[in-house]
Image (cartoon, helix red, strand yellow):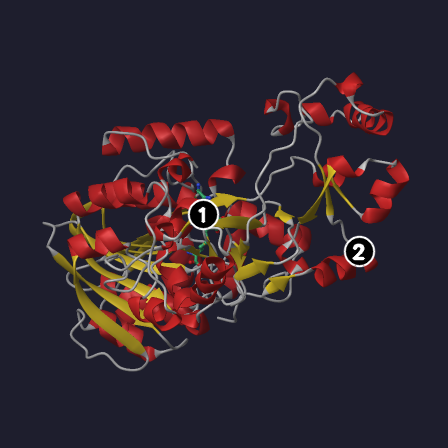
């Protein structure tokens, strides 16, 4: 089958996201099929058939071992089956594909072999009604509801596990949030108490099954039989590698190679570290950033177009200086490891906003006239009814922050993640604020040297959420747990300083 041609942006791409229509490449589908087709399997089930990657893979693997195989599945959007036909599947291959919602109207039977790349539909794209039904289903099965941020794919996995026959096998290709999301610990504790986790397969960015998509995919191989205290963890380092399929069909006996690294891990260690992370990554015995600094997110204005202004806009509005604070909005606006006055001047030259309009909480009429006039304009635009803004009292009272000496660009692919703030700017939400525990210049400088060290930057993958192609998103609390290597600290001549008690209030 030809590779799926993805629209790079726009409505067509958005439609794929809403329907979750990204096809599994054949080399990955065949490896997954090789695992589930072990033993006496007569039928393979795919809950989200799409263009039929798993049907083709199952037919191929069954043919290689000379066994017949029946195919069945569900698919919500039957029109995609046209692509399955074009890829060589016959009407009889597709005859047992039912149009239904696999999670909410599941088939009434059990399966020995299930293969899936479920729709990765994140929670904010699901309707309130569907979310409520999914949550209810999760609570019934697990005994307590999963956090509302669990996307549709999580419930696909749960439903598939529920429909697995005794000793049946399931191979799921899932995004890394399955084991990194806030719900992950509860989910995996439940799964591994009831099912056997045979293996987890991750991919290096260069080997990603979805090179053009911001997703870090992971394969989970699970079996309905007694749990065991260990599992295999592999990292596929080369796309189109036949080693992956050979390893999976050898029941994990084939030796590791440069194409595929393999480790046997204890379940407890894997669950503690996180199943998407390398073995031992969670052994956090070394110092962490929280020993040296606290972290907060940047300022959320609720309406950057109103509160984040260019110098020219601020001048035209005649806003007094006391209500304007130098600020930085997008990570793209800082291309180096420093923000300096020069950076700000350059941004002003190209017409980028650099000033945060920052009114305090006094009554509107108590502001100087230009400020009051501008705020009334905001009310005429109904800004005070916008979601975040409507929670503020009064609506225009801007969040406050001390100027952070170090910024962190919290979502991105670049290696330049920690930025030294030499311009005294306040960051908006594209950044996190890093506040060293001590204010002395020497302490800040040394901490920054530790943070920009490649070894520290590499450790971000231990605490962040991965989005494919090296992109990592890190939340403030997670950043505080960033491990700092003893060797790097020693090299820079740094000793941790106890965290001042009042800072824990953050
Ligand atoms: C990520 S694609 C995977 C397709 C194919 N199995 C593959 O791996 O290439 C997921 C498919 O699930 C379908 N889908 C979305 N929501 C569904 C639901 N609730 N029940 C069944 N199928 C659904 C989408 O139309 C899409 O074709």
Residue 64 visible here:
no
Q: Position of residue 379 (x, y in %)?
A: 77, 23
Q: Quadrant of residue 58?
A: bottom left
Between 297 and 381, the one lying in front of the other is 297
Between 93 and 35, the one lying in front of the other is 35
- Asked which secondary structure carries label 2, the reply is helix
- Contact between marks 2 and 1 (CB within 8 A): the answer is no
Q: Residues within 10 Å of mark 1 (few under 14, many from 20)?
A: some
Q: Position of residue 437 (x, y in %)?
A: 42, 49
Total marks shown come to 2
Residue 236 visible here:
yes
Residue at 29% x, 76% y: name it. Answer: 260
Which numbered disc covers residue 492? none
Residue 266 is left or right of residue 233, and the answer is left
Q: Which residue is mark 1?
A: 475
User: In this rendering, is residue 434 above or below 132?
Assistant: below
Q: Quadrant of residue 461?
A: bottom left
Q: Position of residue 194 (x, y in %)?
A: 16, 43
Residue found at the very far right of the displayed protein: 316
Nearer the N terminus, badge 2 or badge 1?
A: 2
Query: Is the residue indicated by label 2 positioned so its CB lies within 8 Å of ligand 1?
Result: no
Disc 2/disc 1 C-alpha distance (Å)? 29 Å
Q: Residues within 10 Å of mark 2 (few under 14, many from 20)?
A: some
User: In this rendering, is residue 33 above or below 306?
Assistant: below
Residue at 74% x, 35% y: name it. Answer: 323
Q: Which residue is mark 2?
A: 348
Residue at 37% x, 56% y: name it. Answer: 482
Between 350 and 423, the one lying in front of the other is 423
Residue found at the very far bottom of the displayed protein: 258
- Asked which secondary structure carries label 1, the reply is loop
Between marks 2 and 1 in the image, the one whose residue lies nearer the viewer: 2
């Amino acid at each position: 089958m030809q590779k799926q041609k993805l629209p790079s942006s726009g409505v067509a791409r958005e439609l794929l996201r809403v329907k979750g229509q990204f096809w599994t490449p054949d080399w990955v589908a065949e490896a997954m099929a090789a695992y589930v087709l072990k033993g006496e399997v007569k039928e393979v089930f795919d809950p989200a058939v799409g263009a039929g990657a798993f049907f083709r893979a199952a037919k191929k693997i069954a043919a290689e071992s000379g066994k017949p195989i029946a195919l069945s599945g569900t698919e919500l959007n039957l029109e995609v089956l046209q692509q399955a036909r074009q890829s060589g599947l016959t009407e009889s291959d597709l005859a047992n594909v039912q149009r239904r919602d696999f999670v909410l109207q599941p088939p009434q039977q059990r399966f020995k072999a299930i293969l899936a790349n479920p729709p990765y539909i994140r929670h904010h794209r699901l309707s309130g009604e569907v979310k409520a039904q999914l949550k209810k289903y999760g609570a019934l099965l697990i005994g307590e509801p999963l956090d509302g941020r669990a996307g549709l794919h999580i419930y696909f996995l749960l439903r598939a596990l529920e429909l697995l026959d005794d000793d049946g096998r399931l191979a799921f290709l899932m995004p890394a949030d399955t084991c990194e999301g806030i719900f992950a610990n509860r989910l995996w504790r439940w799964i591994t108490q009831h099912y056997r986790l045979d293996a987890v397969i991750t991919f290096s960015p260069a080997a990603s099954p979805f090179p053009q998509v911001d997703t870090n995919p992971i394969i989970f191989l699970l079996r309905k039989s007694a749990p065991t205290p260990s599992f295999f963890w592999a990292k596929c380092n080369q796309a189109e590698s036949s080693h992956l399929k050979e390893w999976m069909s050898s029941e994990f006996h084939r030796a590791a190679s440069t194409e595929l690294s393999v480790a046997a891990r204890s379940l407890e260690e894997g669950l503690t570290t996180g199943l998407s992370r390398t073995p031992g990554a969670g052994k956090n015995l070394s110092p962490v950033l929280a020993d040296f600094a606290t972290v907060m997110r940047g300022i959320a204005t609720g309406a950057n177009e109103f509160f984040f202004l260019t110098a020219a806009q601020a001048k035209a509005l005649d806003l007094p200086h006391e209500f304007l604070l130098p600020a930085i909005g997008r990570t793209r606006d800082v291309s180096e490891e420093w923000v300096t006055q020069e950076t700000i001047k350059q941004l002003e030259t190209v017409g980028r906003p650099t000033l945060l309009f920052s009114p305090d909480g006094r009554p509107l009429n108590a502001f100087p006239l230009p400020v009051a006039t501008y705020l009334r304009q905001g009310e005429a635009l109904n800004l005070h009814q916008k979601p975040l803004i409507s929670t503020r009292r009064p609506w225009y009272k801007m969040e406050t922050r001390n100027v952070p000496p170090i910024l962190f660009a919290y979502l991105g692919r670049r290696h330049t993640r920690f930025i030294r703030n030499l311009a005294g700017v306040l960051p908006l939400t594209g950044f996190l604020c890093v506040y060293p525990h001590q204010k002395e210049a020497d302490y800040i400088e040394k901490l920054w040297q530790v943070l920009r060290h490649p070894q520290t930057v590499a450790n971000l993958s231990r605490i962040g959420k991965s989005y494919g192609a090296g992109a990592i998103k890190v939340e403030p609390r997670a950043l505080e747990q960033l491990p700092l290597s003893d060797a790097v600290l020693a090299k820079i001549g740094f000793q941790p300083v106890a965290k001042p008690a009042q800072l824990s209030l953050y």
